[in-house]
Image (spheres, rainbow, N blue to C red):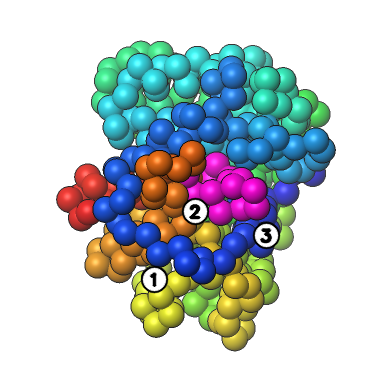
Amino acid sequence: MLRDKLVKVGVCLTLLFSLSGAAFSTSQASTYATEGFINKHMTNQNGTLATYRLPSTTADPNYALGRETLSESIGLWMEYLLVQGKQTEFNQQLQLLNRYYKDSTKHLLYWKLAADGTKNSATNALIDDLKVVEVLYRAHEKWGTTSYKQTADQIARGLAQYQKRQGIYSDYYDIVNGWVGNQVTLSYLNPYAFNKMVQYGIISKAEADRQLVVAKNAPSKNGFLPKRYIISQNAYRYDTRINMIDQSYAALQLSRHGVPKTELANWIEAEFLRYGKLYGQYDLNTKKPLVNYESPALYGITILYFLEVGKTDTAVKMYKRMIQFRENNASNTYYGGYVTLQNNDTHMFDNLFPLLAETELVNRNLI
């Protein structure tokens, strides 16, 4: 069974680090140094993006380890290349997407592959497929290339045909065995992608609205969003250990649909301004931190969320905190990377979202 990848990132980060003596200057690292780090250290021989810098000698069907590659990574990387206007590199990623990740019959994306592109999972992940659909439609509108829309249409039709249970899109679909899950994680729902699927005639507006209502109607508990919606029970479920990547990602998705979740944003801002950091997990009831680690990915996602809801000054302050986790010395081997794990290891998620956040801040002339 496919487990939640967003939580896995948080779990992996429990091995993290301390920042003792790691006070870096913002000016020490050039803009987008992380892009160079990814190209140099996080790219497999076939061009796919590795999940970790270091290889792994073990395998687990439920987790991406070592140099295995994720559909999550290619979607976020294509988004970065799109925003930067790097069409040649974007086209190279699209070729990889079609060659390795996309199922030739159902056109859904396998959520993880071996480093050489061999399929070693049976399922897709809704959040990743929707991100790729979103980015391809945006690329088609920016550059006018027909193949982008054609691929987006294929994946979107696959989602519309296979991914639903009782009219609600599920977290995952077992491509090999034809089985659809019974829950949707709130952060997986991508309003932009659903709206584009309506615009291009893949689904009806009523079907898109049905998905967005699930997210918009989610009741907060002590200011936190529920983790998931159980489709067969028409019920929301909350984790007692609140994973903040989930919270900020779900809130980011909602804010892009005009639902800012102000209570959550205000609490996150107050917590960060009071302590100068945002921890990876908090207690649902007491709202006290349960861990002492921070996450570059969490800062990146929350920066994007805060920019959406107008908390610009705090977003910039978070950026300054975030880049303290980055290698900012240009003479260092891992310059530009968020190498926060043991033995200078890192997770791709912890590089892509900081890179996307940095890009948005630069584009808004905030840094």
Residue depicted at 68% across the width and 20% down the height: 116
Q: Which residue is mark 1?
A: 265
Residue 79 as seen in the image, left or right of residue 57: left
Report the amino acid beneath label 2: Ala
Tell me the residue that label 2 is attached to.
Answer: 297
- Residue at the spot 64% in from the left edge and 76% down from the top edge: 290
The answer to whether residue 20 is visible is: yes
Q: Residues within 10 Å of mark 1 (few under 14, many from 20)?
A: many
Q: What residue sits 66% from the left and 38% below the top?
A: 54
**Left or right: 139, with 64 as reference point:** left
- Residue 60's quadrant in the figure? top right
User: 327 or 331, which is in the foreground?
Assistant: 331
Q: Can you identify the residue that label 3 sits on?
A: 15
Which comes before the other along the chain, label 3 or label 2? 3
> x and y percent of residue 318 in the render?
36, 64
Residue depth check, mark 1 versus mark 2: number of the one nearer the observer: 2
Which span of residues is magenta-colored? Answer: 337-350
Amino acid type at image mark 1? Ala
Residue 343 picture location, percent across and down: 64, 48
Q: Position of residue 242 (x, y in %)?
A: 61, 70
